[in-house]
């Protein structure tokens, strides 16, 4: 857990329809820090309080969505062990050489049962968060630029066979189930929320007939007040808001869902509880799924259920 294996979500590569429009949005509205561009035309960003070189990579494409999500592991020995464990479990893996992504070491890539591409990696250049490590201030003026999330937090992904995803992540990669939403039969899962550390979730899946779909990318804000400030900035910049500000029953997080210029949904998320592997799994019945997702409204809107990229 977190200190010996998979530590945290590390990066996500997102497909966008207009790279220049998207650069403006992610840099000036969302408030990420641009850290580089590569020969393939990809543009790299990080949140102001992240230390590694990148966490969000944009790639221009003909369709929106997610190319892959990567998790940082403890060290090279852990990367090699998890690669071997995945293969022993029956998962085909590929080694992506160091340097394929800017300032990022060798990656182990594999496809999970829901069709999503995942990666593990151990090395990424530490560029710091623009603050001294000796007697640091709590924030800098640069950190207040745009919505200014502190980190890339998690993804919610749509696809089939989420029970097989759960088995893979818990039996091989050391994640554990934190919350679940059940289907009407009360036996099968509609949604699962899993963690590799002490956060309420590092990754979530919803059962969906089409594989490899992105529901949202989430960015962490420190307080409810910052979520409200994000709502103001979204309105000022005419960002298309899906729902919020509101709060979740699941995870207890405070949230706004909105769309980037390409139609990729993103979340600005605050609070949420801490958890541990020995805590009981929280379960939501199908009848209360609306309350679980949007605790104030207690119902889901159709766009939240149906729009994915």
Image (cartoon, grey):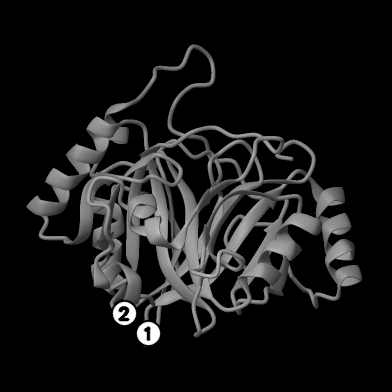
Q: Earlier in the sequence, mark 2 or mark 1?
A: 2
Instruction: Give the image location of residue 305, x and y in percent.
Output: 34, 71
> What's the residue at 60%, 55% (across, down)?
103
Q: Nearer the viewer, mark 2 or mark 1?
A: 1
Instruction: Give the image location of residue 135, x and y in percent.
Output: 49, 11
The residue pinned by badge 1 equals 63
> What's the residue at 27%, 29% (across, down)?
141
Evaluate if marks 2 and 1 touch, with contact meaning CB atoms under 8 Å apart.
yes
In this view of the protein, which residue sits in the foreground, 42 or 299?
299
> What distance separates the C-alpha of mark 2 from that of mark 1?
6 Å
In this view of the protein, which residue sits in the foreground, 2 or 242?
242
Count the labels in the image.
2
Q: Residue furthest front?
A: 185
Horizontally, is 274 left or right of 83 in the view? left
From the image, which quarter does the N terminus lie in?
A: top right
Q: Is residue 28 above or below residue 23?
A: above
Horizontally, is 217 left or right of 17 in the view? right
Q: Is residue 107 visible?
A: no
Dot 1: what SS?
Answer: loop
> What's the residue at 73%, 68% (across, down)?
97
The residue pinned by badge 2 equals 17
Instruction: Give the image location of residue 64, x and y in percent.
Output: 37, 78
Q: Residue furthest top?
A: 135
In this view of the protein, which residue sits in the foreground, 14 or 259?
259
């Amino acid at each position: 857990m977190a200190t010996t294996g998979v530590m945290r979500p590390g990066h996500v590569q997102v497909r966008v329809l207009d790279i220049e429009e998207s650069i403006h949005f992610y840099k000036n509205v969302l408030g990420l820090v641009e850290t580089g561009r590569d020969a393939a035309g990809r543009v790299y960003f990080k949140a102001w309080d992240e230390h590694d070189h990148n966490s969000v990579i944009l790639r221009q494409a003909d369709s929106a969505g997610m190319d892959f999500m990567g998790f940082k592991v403890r060290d090279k020995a852990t990367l090699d062990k998890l690669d071997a464990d995945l293969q022993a479990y029956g998962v085909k893996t590929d080694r992506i050489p160091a340097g394929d992504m800017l300032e990022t070491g060798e990656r182990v890539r594999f496809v999970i049962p829901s069709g999503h591409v995942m990666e593990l990696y151990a090395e990424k250049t530490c560029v710091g968060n623009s603050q001294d490590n000796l007697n640091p201030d709590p924030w800098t003026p640069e950190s207040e630029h745009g919505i200014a999330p502190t980190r890339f937090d998690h993804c919610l992904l749509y696809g089939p066979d989420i029970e097989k995803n759960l088995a893979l992540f818990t039996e091989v990669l050391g994640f554990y189930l934190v919350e679940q939403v059940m289907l009407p039969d009360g036996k099968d899962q509609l949604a699962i929320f899993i963690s590799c550390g002490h956060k309420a979730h590092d990754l979530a899946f919803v059962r969906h007939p089409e594989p490899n779909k992105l529901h949202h990318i989430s960015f962490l804000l420190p307080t409810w007040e910052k979520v409200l400030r994000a709502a103001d900035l979204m309105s000022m910049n005419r960002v298309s808001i899906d729902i919020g500000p509101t709060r979740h029953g699941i995870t207890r997080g405070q949230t706004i869902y909105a769309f980037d210029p390409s139609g990729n949904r993103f979340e600005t998320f605050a609070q949420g509880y801490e958890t541990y592997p020995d805590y009981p799994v929280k379960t939501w019945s199908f009848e209360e799924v609306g309350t679980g997702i949007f605790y104030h409204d207690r119902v889901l809107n159709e766009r939240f259920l149906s729009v994915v990229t």
